[in-house]
Amino acid sequence: MNKMIQKLKVGVIGTGAIAQNRHIPEYKKNRFVELVGVVDANVSRAKEVAHKFYIQHYYQNVKELIENQDLDIISICTPNHTHKEIAEVCLNKGIHVLCEKPLSTHYKDALALIKLAEEKNVFLAVGLNQRLVPAHNKIKEILDHGDLGKVYQIKASFGHGGPEHWSVEGEKNWFFDREKSFFGSLGDLGIHKIDLIRWFLNEEITDVSSLKSTIEKPTYVDDNATVIMKTEGNTLCTVTTSWTYTPWVQNELMISCEFGTLLLEQNPDKPGLTILKRDMEETVEVDWLIKEKSGYHHSGLIHYFVNSVMSKKEPTLISAKTFLGTLKAIFAAEQSAKMKQTICIND
């Protein structure tokens, strides 16, 4: 006779695009989870989303959710400037927290949240979903195997037409409000590529130089940025981000190594990871989402975090501690652009 599964009770704070397209549907598909409530300051949207996804409860603020539900996990999918305060409230209640990046808009706040999570013996993780992408896992596997030798250079680009094209608020989205977002395209998209570089190489960023521009969008944050970095092992890396690419998404990687090169482009007309060596060229089929036998496709983010909580094992790949080096590099890039000089990152 099978024992009944004790499901984890989950709440999602924020009902914008990232909540509706990733967190909520992936929690709903997870058999170890009961999604008991959603929160949004716009209570009519909270109600609408709750009905759309067959969630029993909806609330206007975090306090109402926590007072009325006995929660195991909370996902924070709100504007950047609210992350620290919400995470602090949830951690103090002994709730495991999965927060969308960037976790906080100040480095010292991230450190304080990590310390609090440790004191409360709960997990604090960040939405570093790019580490879970099958295509990126294949690259990591190849680099770790060592056949291509030392990595000399990495070039990465990530861009799309802008958050107004997918945000539920359209042109009035919070990404364009500097007080709420703090970061522009660099913090929105470049943060993923910088994090991948650290993960691929198992090295920290030591030197950062960046340039940012606001070309098209009605905002004071950057809609285009380029960052040049050096790692502990002297690998040079370039990351380019944009909110002005038309009409497609550009998501590319080129990794130049001692004995070959890896090329990855998110292009439906040119699928696969290309491996170039002096005497051969091979294209390996890779996926951008995790595909289950049932045909269900997902990012892996929610599945990974839920499994970590269930097994009581640190979610190492996406933990807030893991994220600190990426956050350091992003703040260094912001400082570099402002001061117009290279920033050396000290431990």
Image (cartoon, grey):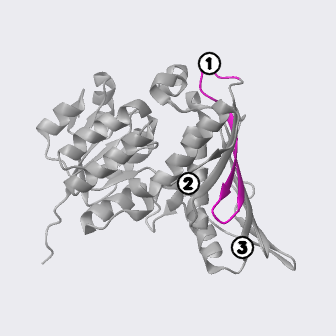
- Residue linked to disc 3: 150
- Residue 332, given in percent of the width and then of the height, sits at 58, 42
Can residue 173 be seen here? The reply is: no
Q: Residue at x 72, y 77 (%)?
A: 149
Going by the numbered disc 1, the residue's amino acid type is Pro
For residue 242: magenta? no
C-alpha separation, residue under disc 3 versus residue under disc 1: 43 Å
- Residue 338, given in percent of the width and then of the height, sits at 64, 30
Residue neighbourhood size for the residue with mark 3, other residues' Cα within 10 Å, grouped as few (<14), some (14–19), many (≥20): some
Q: Is residue 309 above or below residue 247?
A: below
Which labelled disc corresponds to residue 128? none
* Contact? badges 2 and 3 (CB < 8 Å): no
Of all residues, the one furthest to the right in this rendering is 279
30 or 204: nearer the eye? 204
- Residue linked to disc 1: 218
For residue 230: magenta? yes
C-alpha separation, residue under disc 1 versus residue under disc 2: 28 Å
Q: Earlier in the sequence, mark 2 or mark 3?
A: 3
